[in-house]
Amino acid sequence: MDQKEIAGLVSVLILLLLVGVIITLFIVFVRRKNKLVEEQERTKKAFEKELSETQIEIREETLRNISWELHDNIGQLMTLAKIQVQLAKDRPETLEEVAQTIGKGIHELRTLSKLINPEALKSLNLIEALNMEIERFNRLEFLKSNFLVTGKQYDIGNEKEIIIFRILQEFFSNTIKHSKASHLNVEINYKADKLFILAQDNGIGFASDADYSGIGMKNMKNRAKVIGADLKITSEKDKGTALKLTYEPNPEKLDDI
Amino acid sequence: MDELFNSVFHYIVLSFYGIATVTAILFYGKYKHTVLKYFVWILIYNLINEISAKYVYYWLDRNVIMYNVYNTVFFSYFFYVFWNFVKGKTYKKWIVYSVILFLIATVINVFTVNAYYDSLMISYITGACLIIFCIILYYIEILSDTRVLHIREDLLFWISIGLLLFYVGYIPIKLSREFFAGNDDLFITLYNVQRILIIIMYSCFTMGFIWTKKK
């Protein structure tokens, strides 16, 4: 072989080798990119699934609350009014009391109808929704509840607020159903870089996670994970249960209200 | 011995052309909705060109003009394909500039050498470099795409690998032949390397036709 031919051959081989390396790298990059994109899509789908389930649960919970409220609150008032009317047959001067009871019933009915208006529910933000929930506990005298918001409020996105609300709602319903607590305290602290939520009751608590696993703990943790929040539930026997949720919003999406 | 080897090698290369063309026709249904549907005609044209080139050479003693025409058609078609597949507006514009540059080079070349006797060197080298450039643009776009792309099932990806390997290898062969040797026969090893490159390229095409999935 001619020397020039060898030179040509070598240069061809080197170039082919280079192109081979480039193509291999390219394929590796495309694979990795595909993996990342698939991962993102999976996360997004999980979030959407969780969100729609959450919305359904909130709706069911709302219906349950309405039925509860109708039965325990308005129903009781109506029963009372009925008894009062029956008694008023003999003592007509007590009719004024009957009117008052019915008036109270109408007032409660109005409050309720305002609360369950779907438009109102849809446009609620986290704070308003929690406020309503707390007010309801106080009104129905399930528990003595306090609600405190500190820091400058910002929007973390409606979908994420819905999920956080559902986590808290689950906690409240556990408190009411199982803890025998008399007080519930909820605090929300809007810090510049993170949102900190504390909810605690003074109920019977539970000794180990095992006691709590049956009542939606896994679900709550799962939801917190979906929105990337940190959820801790701690409990001491006979002292109460506390929920601590820390959420760091995406700095680009922060919007002041 | 050399004569026999040469002749066998020639038929091997021809058979690779044939295999690629046959698979292209067999799997035509998988890509007939894209601009790559014309590729099958290019392959048939190539096959006819290659087979007849030998006889034309015996007959007229010259067949360079056949390759000159074929190469110009081939390059123009692939500019069109990449222009069609690349989505980015800037990239599309660059491909248009590439076509203009290629046309200018071809016109100059046609006026400077006699296309009947000599290969259109400037046109060919410009075309090959610009096709490589278009392939790079196409690859960049695949990498920056936010969707999941299964490139193994993408016909153009296989075709572009074939083209890239062939032209990157063949440009130096063509140049060294042009500058160091007047006669093609002098560089027999390089000529065989060229044939291997052709086999690689057409194998890539064949794989592409087999692997590709209808989108």
Image (spheres, helix red, strand yellow):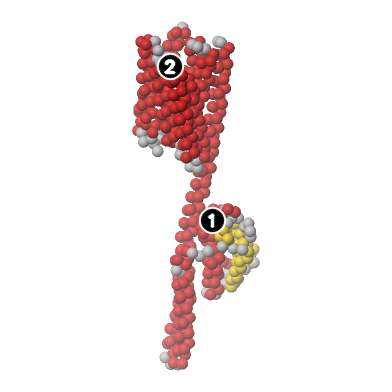
Q: Residues within 10 Å of mark 1 (few under 14, many from 20)?
A: many
Disc sitting over residue B114 in the figure: 2
Q: Can residue A242 be seen here?
A: no
* Residue with the mark numbered 1: A223
From the image, which quarter does the C terminus of chain A lie in? Answer: bottom right
Residue B148, percent from left and from top: 48, 41
Name which residue lies at 58% across and 69% down.
Answer: A180
Q: Residue at x 42, y 35 (%)?
A: B84
Local crowd at mark 2 within 10 Å, few (<14), some, or many (≥20)? Answer: few
**Quadrant of the image for the N terminus of chain A?**
top right
Q: Is residue A181 above or below residue A37?
A: below
| Rendered residue at 59%/71% (across/down) | A145
Residue B110 visible at all: yes
For mark 1, give the secondary structure.
helix
Q: For the residue marked with disc 1, what is the amino acid?
A: Arg
The answer to whether B1 is drawn above or below residue A240 in the figure is: above
Apparent side of residue B71 relative to residue A157 in the rendered image (left or right)? left
Where is residue B26? Give x, y as percent.
Answer: 35, 28
Instruction: Identify the element where label 2 is drawn.
Output: loop
The residue positioned 57% from the left and 22% from the top of the image is: A14
Q: Nearer the viewer, residue A113 or B186?
A: B186
